[in-house]
Image: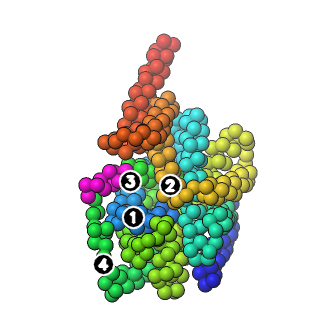
């Protein structure tokens, strides 16, 4: 019962903070990009809070429970992608967005290509984003199940309700400040729990798993590491949820520094869930569901006061990433679909209202999907695969290649997604992960058709 009271207290704190910051929202610019007022600290905290979620806590600890130190590469790959984002795509797309009044990645795609590219990618990302939202809600349900005996469906609905309500109230300004609060809770909870458990393992001489713990990257694990790198590094360079938070930066320097600090923190944090998963394996070698590793530690291997801190950290982690995904879903639905096809003349008030309704719809659909998908990692893998396949080449190519056009962008999307899922279904061995194998021909298609389209336009002008 004490853990349920702690969870209720954290949830109430987040809701109160979200509604308190709702007074800062006076229009769509505030709601979407915080009026471009986020300094380095808030860019850093809101990105890191979004990135330390279900996959990097419950999911990563579950991988470490199974694979040992190899699991570092799950969060480590996200850190590598974020480091590249800090010094390439992040500041560059911030400049384009600021100069042209862009609020979302969909706005950028229409500005750079045309409305067809915007709508196609928006629809694909909507599908993938519901999957990653489901992953956060599954993690919340595991926490509620272990600590309070709440069934998975009810736990998913509770998590969706909390994240949706405080984001709906405050938009990006509210979420950024609630994220800063959540980040403090996470650092305190994970830090205290890890120190306590490492001392406990050392004092009790629980060293019977040296073969399991070893092997950071051995012969048999190289393919797994390459798969993580291929899926996660590109995703963290082009994720709309992260880029739209960067759009809220005060200036280009704040964007670059905030993203870089977030990347460094992720690279350091990657060892935390890895060690927690390994310690859980030592304590509970027969655990039936590996994703219960971290929730089991907080209830059975820690004193109540540290378990409560870790519980708060876990709950903050999953909810903060859930609100980032709801932000991505709702802004895309309202800007990329509602404003284009339903209400082109919508004013600021109508647009913010539509975004809030889209957030409620997204939270509901995410909860329903979470009930159906079995594990956190399954849900997150769907998102990252679809995101990289659909968006990586059009977004990066559009920023760095003047020749890029909509014909090449659409061709790359079709080739990349088709090959990724066809190769993933085939059972023969590939030299590289299916996603990486698909990006190479998709890049060729992007360049070839962009070049051909530009030549055709040039000929048409000459004939005139």
Q: Residues within 10 Å of mark 3 (few under 14, many from 20)?
A: many
| 340 to the left or right of 410 | right
Task: Kindly report the distance in space between the C-alpha atoms of the residues bearing marks 2 and 4.
Answer: 31 Å
Q: For residue 322, say whether it is visible.
A: yes
Depth check: 397 or 411 in front? 411
Residue drawn at x 55%, y 36% is 117
- Number of numbered discs visible in the structure rendering: 4
* Residue 168: quarter of image: bottom right
Q: Residue furthest top?
A: 463
Find disc 1 in the rendering and name its residue. 66
Depth check: 177 or 445 in front? 445
Task: Kindly report the distance in space between the C-alpha atoms of the residues bearing marks 4 and 1.
Answer: 17 Å
Q: Mark 3 or 2 closer to N-term?
A: 3
Give residue 269's position: percent from left, percent from top. 39, 68
Find disc 3 in the rendering and name its residue. 228
> How are the residues colored?
rainbow
State the SS at label 3: helix
Whether 262 is drawn above or below 227: the answer is: below
Residue drawn at x 63%, y 43% is 336
Find disc 4 in the rendering and name its residue. 207
Q: Mark 1 or 2 closer to N-term?
A: 1
Residue 269: within the magenta?
Answer: no
């Amino acid at each position: 019962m004490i853990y349920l009271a702690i969870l209720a207290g954290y949830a109430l704190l987040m809701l109160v903070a979200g509604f308190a910051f709702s007074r800062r929202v006076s229009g769509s610019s505030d709601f979407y990009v915080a009026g471009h007022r986020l300094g380095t600290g808030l860019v850093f905290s809101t990105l890191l809070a979004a990135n330390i979620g279900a996959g990097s806590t419950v999911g990563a600890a579950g991988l470490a429970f199974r694979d040992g130190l190899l699991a570092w590469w799950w969060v480590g790959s996200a850190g590598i992608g974020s480091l590249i984002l800090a010094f390439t795509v992040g500041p560059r797309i911030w400049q384009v967005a600021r100069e042209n009044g862009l609020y979302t990645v969909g706005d950028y795609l229409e500005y750079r290509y045309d409305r067809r590219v915007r709508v196609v990618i928006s629809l694909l990302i909507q599908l993938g984003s519901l999957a990653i939202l489901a992953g956060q809600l599954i993690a919340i349900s595991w926490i509620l199940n272990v600590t309070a005996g709440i069934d998975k469906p009810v736990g998913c609905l509770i998590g969706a309700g909390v994240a949706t309500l405080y984001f709906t109230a405050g938009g990006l300004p509210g979420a950024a400040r609630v994220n800063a609060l959540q980040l403090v809770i996470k650092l305190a909870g994970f830090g205290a729990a890890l120190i306590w458990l490492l001392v406990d393992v050392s004092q009790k001489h629980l060293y019977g798993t040296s073969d399991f713990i070893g092997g950071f990257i051995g012969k048999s694990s190289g393919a797994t590491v390459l798969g993580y790198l291929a899926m996660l590094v590109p995703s963290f360079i082009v994720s709309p949820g992260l880029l739209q938070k960067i759009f809220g930066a005060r200036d280009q320097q704040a964007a670059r520094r905030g993203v870089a600090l977030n990347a460094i923190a992720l690279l350091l944090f990657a060892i935390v869930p890895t060690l927690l998963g390994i310690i859980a394996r030592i304590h509970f070698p027969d655990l039936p569901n590996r994703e219960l590793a971290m929730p089991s530690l907080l209830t059975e291997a820690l004193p109540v006061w540290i378990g409560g801190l870790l519980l708060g950290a876990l709950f903050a982690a999953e909810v903060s990433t859930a609100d980032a995904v709801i932000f991505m879903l709702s802004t895309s639905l309202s800007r990329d679909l509602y404003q284009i096809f339903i209400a082109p003349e919508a004013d600021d008030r109508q647009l913010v209202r539509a975004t809030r309704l889209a957030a409620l719809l997204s939270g509901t659909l995410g909860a329903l999907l979470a009930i159906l998908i079995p594990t956190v990692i399954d849900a997150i893998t769907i998102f990252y695969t679809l995101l990289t396949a659909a968006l990586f080449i059009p977004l990066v190519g559009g920023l760095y290649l003047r020749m890029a056009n909509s014909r090449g962008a659409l061709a790359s999307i079709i080739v990349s997604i088709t090959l990724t899922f066809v190769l993933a279904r085939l059972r023969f061995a590939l030299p590289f992960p299916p996603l990486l194998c698909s990006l190479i021909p998709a890049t060729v298609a992007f360049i070839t058709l962009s070049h051909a389209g530009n030549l055709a336009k040039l000929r048409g002008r000459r004939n005139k």
